[in-house]
Image (tube, grey):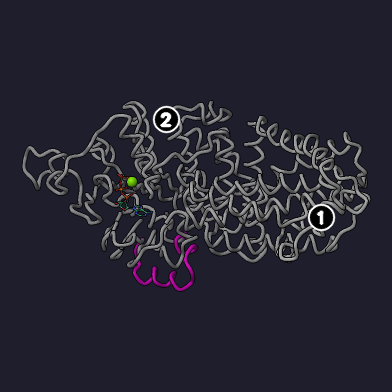
């Protein structure tokens, strides 16, 4: 074995560094998929939660009182909301992994490699998306079981899948930012809870925005989850109409993700300090 | 590592620097390197030169600043003041080049237990930019070198402590770095596993002229492995040199333990598992 360098570390032209960036992103995603394949039980947990919500709670909620959903059956109305909830809850805890990885030595190994920090963070964020993607399947299956009025158009399903991946990545990078700031698991858990509850309730996941008091309604405009729910609902349900427009919903996810990844990439190496 | 490739790595400005001195830069050179954590000075104005092709040991009691030194050299922590060069590359100005230049094995376990040995190697081969045309070959080569080929497809959580450590070394070799940095490479391992690691490290130095920097607080390890040591105490270098010289300076019958006690005022704890578990997890020692 001759010592030699595999990478011309600093140099390289623009296209090279572009390729390097995405090679790292995909290496991280691939690693996460492989982890999932070694541990399929984890998948099961992700199936049970939305099923319970949709099959048990939805009928209870809808019988309690009449919720004005614009002519959409309440079970149908909250199906995309439950998908969004799954995306939020499972992504927002993802950041704690970075603290576990630090306490092992994995984070140090990642950071001691020449890989771009942005690529490492985006890889982690999109991995959360990939991990949540099977939920789309679950929700559609459940929707079929409760015979919801679903758009079975492949493009619409693709839009739902993309939104789930983007939304997961967005909330995962938010959670990475929190983890890198608090640096400690206990504080991470408590801050996370303080963050998740308002994100969830200041969105139209469970009830229409029209039902909210004005101040809460204003907050929904600042909440990326509102746009995710809006996008998921309008893409998934044949009777639903988008409040912001699907393009806006996508744009908010992409821009929010970009900002949070940039921020997380700055903070990521500091977890070690 | 040749001077030529060091030049390729550094910017044009530095290349002329290297040419003007006309010699291969040392593997590591620290210049008044200092790292503070709040009011605590973990590494205090350290000046150290590690020659290319040597196995160099940083010795010291718990908390002496060994890991901190290594984290600064591997660009994981920025220095508070001073700087260091790795093969002539500045850790502050050329951090990415420094990173490509070294393989690092942290004090804590740094492999994914759920993944197989091969999958772990694959991730890092990609992070280090090992070209796909040679990726498999390099991974096989490194696994073979550490006698792990037959366990390549086994999940790492089923590995023994010694195998895990060997895998971590294999991972660190996948991009063929000229410098290997190991933080407490054999802590928690039984004597056989420890000796196996020493043999591999010796072979890497002898056959590939690699420079190897290790930290340890086990005298036996320093004696069995290192050409030169620096004894650290409270962030400073208390003694430096080849082990026989350090011993001779103290008297004809002095052991390395004596040297250590003379320079640090403390004895080395050579504890059992509890000690190993604790020291391999010092990274968890945060508020
Ligand atoms: N991130 C950190 N924040 C605050 N203090 C730190 C941090 N990392 C290390 N220290 C402190 O710096 C000092 C040196 O720590 P370091 O880990 O470098 O010691 P060490 O020589 O590697 O010890 P050990 O043998 O236990 O691994 C210790 O007092 C430690 O508590
Ligand atoms: Mg240490």
Number of numbered discs: 2
Please report the residue visible at 22 percent of the width from the left and 55 percent of the height from the top: B237
Residue A123: mark = none
Please report the residue visible at 70 percent of the width from the left and 53 percent of the height from the top: A201
Task: State the SS at label 2.
Answer: helix
Q: Main secondary structure of the magenta part?
A: helix
Q: Position of residue B278 (x, y in %)?
A: 34, 37
Asked if residue A120 shows in the view, the reply is: no
Q: Is A138 in front, or is A146? A: A146
Instruction: Judge from the rendering whether residue B221 lies leftward or rightward of residue A221; answer left or right.
Output: left
Residue B161: mark = 2
Q: Position of residue A70 (x, y in %)?
A: 91, 54
Q: Is mark 2 within 8 Å of ligand 1?
A: no
How crowded pointer 1 is (Cα within 10 Å; few <14, some 14-19, many 20+) is rated as some
Distance of label 1 from label 2 (alpha carbons): 55 Å
Where the C terminus of chain A falls, by quadrant?
bottom left
How crowded pointer 2 is (Cα within 10 Å; few <14, some 14-19, many 20+) is rated as some
Asked if residue B183 shows in the view, the reply is: yes
Vertical side of A270 occupied by A36: above or below: above
Magenta-span inclusion, residue B77: no
The magenta span reads B5-24
Chain ID, mark 1 = A
Q: Position of residue B1 (x, y in %)?
A: 42, 54
Chain ID, mark 2 = B
Residue A17, quarter of picture: bottom right
Q: Is mark 1 within 8 Å of ligand 1?
A: no
Vertical side of B62 occupied by B17: above or below: below
> Mark 1 — residue?
A208
Task: State the SS at label 1.
Answer: loop
Q: Position of residue A122 (x, y in %)?
A: 63, 55
Q: Is B49 in front, or is A216? A: A216
């Amino acid at each position: 074995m001759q010592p030699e360098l595999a990478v011309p570390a600093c140099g390289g032209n623009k296209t090279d560094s572009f390729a390097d960036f995405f090679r790292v992103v995909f290496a991280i995603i691939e690693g996460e998929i492989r982890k999932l394949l070694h541990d399929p039980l984890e998948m099961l947990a992700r199936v049970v939660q939305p099923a319970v919500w949709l099959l048990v709670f939805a009928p209870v909620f809808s019988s309690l009182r009449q919720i004005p959903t614009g002519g959409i059956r309440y079970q149908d109305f909250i199906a995309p909301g439950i998908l969004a909830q799954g995306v939020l809850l499972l992504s927002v805890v993802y950041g704690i992994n970075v603290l576990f990885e630090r306490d092992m030595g994995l984070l140090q190994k990642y950071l001691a490699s020449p890989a771009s920090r942005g690529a490492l963070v985006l890889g982690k964020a999109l991995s959360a998306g990939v991990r949540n993607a099977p939920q789309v399947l679950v929700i559609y299956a459940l929707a079929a079981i409760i015979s919801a009025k679903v758009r079975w158009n492949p493009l619409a399903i693709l839009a739902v899948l993309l939104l789930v991946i983007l939304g997961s990545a967005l909330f995962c990078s938010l959670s990475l930012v929190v983890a890198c700031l608090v640096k400690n698991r206990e504080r991470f858990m408590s801050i996370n809870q303080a963050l998740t509850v308002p994100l969830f309730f200041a969105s139209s996941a469970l009830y229409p925005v029209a039902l909210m008091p004005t101040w809460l309604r204003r907050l929904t405009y600042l909440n990326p989850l509102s746009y995710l729910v809006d996008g998921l609902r309008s893409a998934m349900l044949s009777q639903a109409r988008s409040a912001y427009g699907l393009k806006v919903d996508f744009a908010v996810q992409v821009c929010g993700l970009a900002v949070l990844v940039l921020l997380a990439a700055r903070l990521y190496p500091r977890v070690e300090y | 590592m040749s001077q030529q490739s060091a030049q390729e790595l550094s910017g044009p400005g530095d290349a002329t620097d290297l040419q003007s001195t006309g010699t291969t830069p040392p593997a590591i050179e620290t210049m008044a390197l200092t790292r503070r954590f709040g009011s605590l000075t973990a590494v205090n104005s350290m000046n150290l030169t590690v020659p290319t092709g040597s196995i160099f040991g940083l010795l010291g009691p718990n908390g002496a600043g060994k890991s901190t030194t290594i984290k600064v050299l591997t660009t994981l922590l920025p220095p508070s003041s001073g700087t260091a060069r790795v093969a002539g590359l500045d850790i502050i100005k050329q951090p990415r080049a420094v990173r490509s230049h070294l393989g690092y094995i942290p004090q804590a376990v740094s492999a994914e237990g759920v993944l197989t040995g091969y999958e772990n190697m694959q991730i890092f081969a990609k992070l280090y930019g090992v070209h796909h045309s040679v990726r498999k070959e390099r991974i096989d080569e490194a696994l073979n070198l550490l006698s792990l080929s037959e366990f390549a497809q086994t999940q790492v959580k089923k590995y023994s402590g010694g195998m895990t450590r060997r895998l971590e070394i294999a991972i660190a070799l996948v991009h063929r770095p000229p410098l290997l940095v190991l933080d407490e490479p054999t802590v928690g391992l039984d004597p056989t596993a420890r000796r196996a690691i020493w043999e591999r490290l010796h072979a890497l130095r002898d056959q590939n002229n690699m420079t190897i920097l290790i930290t340890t607080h086990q005298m036996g390890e320093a004696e069995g492995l290192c050409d030169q040591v620096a004894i650290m105490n409270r962030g400073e270098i208390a003694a430096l040199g080849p082990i026989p010289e350090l011993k001779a300076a103290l008297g004809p019958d002095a052991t390395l333990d004596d040297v250590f006690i003379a320079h640090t005022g403390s004895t080395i704890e050579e504890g059992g598992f509890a000690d190993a578990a604790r020291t391999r997890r010092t990274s968890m020692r945060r508020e």
